[in-house]
Amino acid sequence: MKVAIYSPYLDTFGGGEKYMMTIAEVLASGNMVDVLLDQHLMDLGGNYLKDKLSERFNLNIKTVNFIKAPVGKKSSFVSRLLFLKKYDLLFYLTDGSIFFPTAKKNILHIQSPLVGQPAKSIWGKYKLRGWDLIIYNSQFTKAHSEKNWPIKSEIIYPPVDIDKIKPLKKEKYILSVGRFFGYLKDKKHALLIKVFKDLFETGRINEWSLHLVGSAGEGDKGYLGQLKDLAKGIPVKFYPNLGYDQLIKLYGQSWVYWHALGFGEEDPTKMEHFGISTVEAMAGGSVPIVVNKGGLKEIVISGKDGFLWVDSNQLKKLTTDLISNTKLLQKMSKDAVESAKRFNKDIFVRQILQLTAKSLFN
């Protein structure tokens, strides 16, 4: 079987790219798999991308080919039609734009709520007819996209490498993971610091500390500085650009995991579309106390393996009630580890193999 995979933003090394490259790894066993590179990606170099993706996501894609293809901006419509005809199966991670595909079977992957197209135009509807199936990464993403993408769809949750994450000797840590993005401030770090500060200064959370992990670029330094100023005088530790091995250790050491992306937002694009870091934390035995928004509601079974909150007062109460009840904390930690297994990479592999077999023979 000849398989083509096109992800326009491979160089961002994000969740969507991991999703697509895991599909490449899965299907490379016994099949010819080509990762298609548009001009922008070709400028970066196929070998560079292959090496970086393998390292970043711990994938075995040695036999996967990274090749130049007539896809992306300014590519030839006719050349693309002819080029894709040689493939039995095409996977495309769309950011909302699509093209008319000519592989035998054509599958779209949608990672985040997409509205506005392509069903609202005649040309968009024509292009959409060429696609056989959409894979969504969560029920939340599907619910906020499918009206404008009216074709057959399935949900396959992202692969999470939970086997590498284990509970360790627990410390009185509250952990939160999310980029220190100064432009958007979407991870709500300030809210979490203020909540922790109130709990700490009123004596409701003695001997505990808050640990904030996230990537940070040059443009985020000012924002990071503001957060550090806000946290002065209280036990808050910052870990910009922490290595994955160190992050795994923190997952295993932390008793509690906080997540606030989407709080106060109505726009679904500003909410967590799934929540891989929450699953990773649960695998380490960290009990999630996360905002009741987006895909997080599909991960946490509130009251069993974690809690969902709607406002800062509820976040404070759920946290203090949990950490003051040692038996409950220990039980929920164990339940979180078990619950995280629902998103094991092995399940993703099985679903992708079943999907491709069904797609080719239907």
Image (cartoon, grey):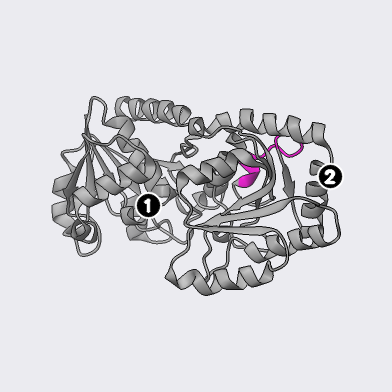
Residue at horizontal 67 percent and vertical 54 percent from the top: 210
Instruction: Say which label, 2 or 1, has the lower sequence index.
Output: 1
User: Along the line of sight, which residue is nearer the eye, 319 or 296?
Assistant: 319
Give percent across and percent down for residue 4: 24, 41
Give percent across and percent down for residue 190: 66, 66
Q: Is residue 240 above or below residue 27?
A: below
- Mark 2 residue element: helix
Q: Is residue 300 magenta?
A: yes
- Mark 1 residue element: loop
Q: Amino acid at mark 2?
A: Asp
Q: Is residue 81 above or below residue 160?
A: below
Q: Amino acid at mark 1?
A: Phe
Quarter holding residue 166: top right
Q: Is residue 49 magenta?
A: no
Residue for badge 2:
321
Residue at horizontal 36 percent and vertical 56 percent from the top: 12
Nearest to viewer (mark 2 / mark 1): 2
Residue at horizontal 59 percent and vertical 62 percent from the top: 267
Give percent across and percent down for residue 168: 61, 34
Boundaries of the magenta span: 296-305
Is residue 225 rendered to the left or right of residue 286?
left
Q: Is residue 341 above or below residue 5?
A: above
Residue for badge 1:
13
Is residue 59 rendered to the left or right of residue 223?
left
Is residue 259 rendered to the left or right of residue 356?
right
